[in-house]
C-alpha cells in the first residue's frame, strides 16, 4: 500500500476454513472453524457458557491488537516514552499479568486453554512468562483468521521481489558479505564474495549478531556477553516430505497436541534439551492447493519447536522422525512411511549454516517484557552513523509480519534523516 499496490496485484489470498485442526488426544480431533458461530459452538462443547467468556476475551484482544498495530508496532524503540500513552497506561495491567493468568481466569477445560495459549509458544516464552498484552495473537488467530497465498508462501516473496524491481531496485543474489570498511564512523564500502560495493547507507536484514561480528569490536552495539544473556525464541526441527498418496483425517494445518504442552515448553525454555514427547505441527498445502504437489500426491512440512543451541545430529533427527511417524500413523490411521518419495530435514545446524542464526534460532529473540520495544537491540548502530538493522532480533519482534514492519521502521528513520540533511542545506 505504501507504493499504491495491493496484494492481489501479485498473489491471491484464500481464507482457510477450518483455520486449522488440533489433535488434543488420539481420539479428540477438532477443526477450529473460521466463523464466529463455529468457534462459539466449539467452546460450548467443552465448557458450557464459555462462548460468552470467549467473546469478552476477544473484545479485549481486539483492543490490544489495534493498540499494538496503531501505536506500538511501528515505533523505532529509541526511548521507552514512545510506548507511553493514555491507551497504554489504561492497559497497564495487561503488561503485568501473564497470558496464562488471563486465559485461566476464564477458561477451565485443558483443550480450550491449549487452544488459547499455544499461539504465544513461538514468541519465545511460556504463556506464564508472556505478558497478557500478547492476547492480540488470539484475535489475529481466531477473528482475522488463517490465510493461504495460492501457489505457496514463496509467491509472497516473489511479489515483493517484483515490486522492488518495478521500483528500480537492483538485486544481487548469492552474494555473501565478508566485512565492512568504515572511515570516521561512516561505512563507505561493503566487501562481498562478488566484489566491493561503495555505499552511503547499509541496512542489514541478516542475523544481528552475525552482522556485528563483521565489524571491529569497538564499532559493535553489543558484546558477546550481552547476546549470551538474552532469552531466545525456539529453533525448529523441520521435515519436508513428499508422499505418493493423499492423506485422510488431517487438514491444511494440523496441530498434534496429544502430549503435554507444559513439558514440551519446559524442554525449550527451562532446561534446554530435546523434548521427550514433542508436540508438532504439520502443514499440508496440497490439501488446499493442487499446484503444490502432483495429482494424487501430498507435500508436508512437519515442524517441532525446540530449544536453540542444543546438539543437532543426523541420528537425533532420525530418532525424532521415527517418533513423529509413529504418532502420525497411529493417530490419523494413515500409512505414511512406505509412501515417502521425498524427504529432507532442516534444523539448528542448517539455520546457522544458511542464515548465520545465533544459536540456530528460528524465531528471533523472545518477546518477554524486558525484551520488548525499547529493550530490544537498537535498529541503528550507535557508533557508525549509517548502519541500520532490521529483522527478528530488533523491533518490533520475530515472525514474518514484524520482520517486514522492521524494514518499514528503518526505511522511515532513513527518510527522516535524509530530509533533515536536505532541509539543512
Image (cartoon, rainbow, N blue to C red):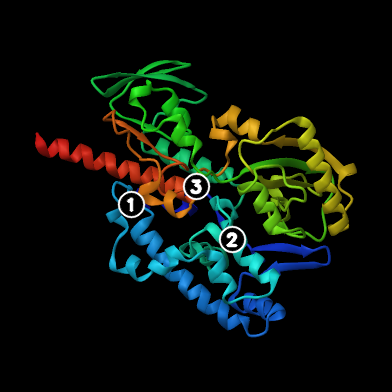
Q: Residue 174 carries which label?
A: none
Circle 1: element type: loop
Q: Which mark is residue 398?
A: 3
Residue matched to label 1: 75
Neighbourhood count class around disc 1 (C-alpha, 10 Å): few under 14, some 14–19, many 20 upward: many
**Which of 8/308 is in front?**
308
Q: Where is residue 194 in the image (x, y as percent from the top left)?
A: 46, 16
Q: Position of residue 162 (x, y in %)?
A: 46, 39
Find residue 69 and report its image quarter.
Answer: bottom left
Q: In screen coordinates, is 418 left or right of 239?
A: left
Regarding residue 408, the answer to whether it shows in the image is yes
**Which of 93/280 is in front?**
93
Q: Where is residue 144 in the image (x, y as percent from the top left)?
A: 52, 65
> In the rendered structure, which disc, 1 or 3, sits on the residue that comes first in sequence?
1
Q: Is residue 111 above or below residue 130?
A: below
Q: Position of residue 336 (x, y in %)?
A: 86, 47
**Which of 43/199 is in front?**
43
Q: In screen coordinates, is 403 left or right of 279?
A: left
Residue visible at 52% across and 24% down?
174
Regarding residue 17, the answer to whether it shows in the image is no
Asked whether the beta carbons under mark 2 and mark 1 sit within 8 Å of each other, the answer is no
Residue matched to label 2: 146
> In the rendered structure, which disc, 3 or 2, sits on the residue that comes first in sequence?
2
Residue visible at 38% across and 47% down?
375
Q: How many marks?
A: 3
Q: Distance between the residues labelled 3 and 2?
A: 18 Å
Find residue 191 and report its image quarter.
Answer: top left
Amino acid at each position: 500500500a505504501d507504493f499504491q499496490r495491493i496484494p492481489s496485484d501479485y498473489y491471491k489470498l484464500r481464507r482457510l476454513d477450518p483455520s486449522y485442526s488440533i489433535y488434543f488426544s488420539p481420539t479428540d480431533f477438532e477443526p477450529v472453524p473460521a466463523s464466529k458461530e463455529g468457534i462459539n459452538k466449539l467452546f460450548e462443547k467443552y465448557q458450557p457458557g464459555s462462548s460468552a467468556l470467549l467473546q469478552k476475551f476477544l473484545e479485549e484482544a481486539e483492543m490490544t491488537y489495534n493498540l499494538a498495530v496503531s501505536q506500538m508496532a511501528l515505533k523505532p524503540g529509541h526511548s521507552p516514552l514512545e510506548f507511553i500513552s493514555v491507551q497504554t497506561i489504561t492497559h497497564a495491567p495487561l503488561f503485568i499479568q501473564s497470558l496464562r493468568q488471563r486465559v485461566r481466569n476464564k477458561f477451565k477445560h485443558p483443550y480450550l486453554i491449549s487452544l488459547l495459549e499455544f499461539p504465544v509458544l513461538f514468541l519465545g516464552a511460556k504463556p506464564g512468562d508472556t505478558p497478557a498484552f500478547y492476547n492480540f495473537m488470539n484475535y489475529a488467530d481466531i477473528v482475522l483468521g488463517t490465510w493461504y497465498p495460492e501457489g505457496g508462501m514463496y509467491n509472497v516473496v516473489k511479489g515483493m521481489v517484483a515490486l522492488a524491481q518495478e521500483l528500480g531496485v537492483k538485486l544481487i543474489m548469492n552474494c555473501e558479505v565478508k566485512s565492512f570498511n568504515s572511515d570516521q564512523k561512516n561505512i563507505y564500502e561493503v566487501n562481498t564474495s562478488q566484489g566491493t560495493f561503495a555505499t552511503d547507507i547499509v541496512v542489514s536484514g541478516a542475523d544481528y549478531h552475525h552482522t556485528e561480528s563483521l565489524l571491529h569490536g569497538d564499532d559493535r552495539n553489543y558484546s558477546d556477553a550481552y547476546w549470551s544473556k538474552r532469552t531466545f525464541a525456539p529453533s525448529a526441527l523441520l521435515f519436508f516430505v513428499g508422499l505418493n498418496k493423499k492423506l485422510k483425517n488431517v487438514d491444511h494445518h494440523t496441530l498434534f497436541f496429544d502430549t503435554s504442552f507444559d513439558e514440551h515448553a519446559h524442554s525449550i525454555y527451562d532446561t534446554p534439551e530435546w523434548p521427550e514427547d514433542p508436540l508438532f505441527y504439520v502443514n499440508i498445502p496440497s490439501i488446499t492447493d493442487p499446484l503444490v504437489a502432483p495429482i494424487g500426491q501430498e507435500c508436508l512440512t512437519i515442524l517441532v519447536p525446540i530449544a536453540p543451541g542444543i546438539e543437532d545430529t543426523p541420528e537425533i533427527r532420525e530418532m525424532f522422525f521415527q517418533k513423529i511417524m509413529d504418532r502420525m500413523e497411529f493417530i490419523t490411521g494413515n500409512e505414511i512411511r512406505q509412501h515417502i518419495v521425498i524427504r529432507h530435514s532442516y534444523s539448528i545446524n542448517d539455520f546457522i549454516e544458511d542464515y548465520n542464526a545465533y544459536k540456530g534460532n528460528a524465531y528471533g529473540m523472545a518477546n518477554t517484557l524486558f525484551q520488548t520495544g525499547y529493550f530490544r537491540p537498537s535498529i541503528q548502530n550507535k557508533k557508525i552513523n549509517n548502519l541500520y538493522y532490521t529483522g527478528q532480533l530488533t523491533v518490533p519482534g520475530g515472525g514474518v509480519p514484524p520482520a517486514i514492519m522492521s524494514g518499514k521502521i528503518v526505511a522511515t528513520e532513513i527518510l527522516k534523516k535524509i530530509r533533515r540533511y536536505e532541509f539543512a542545506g
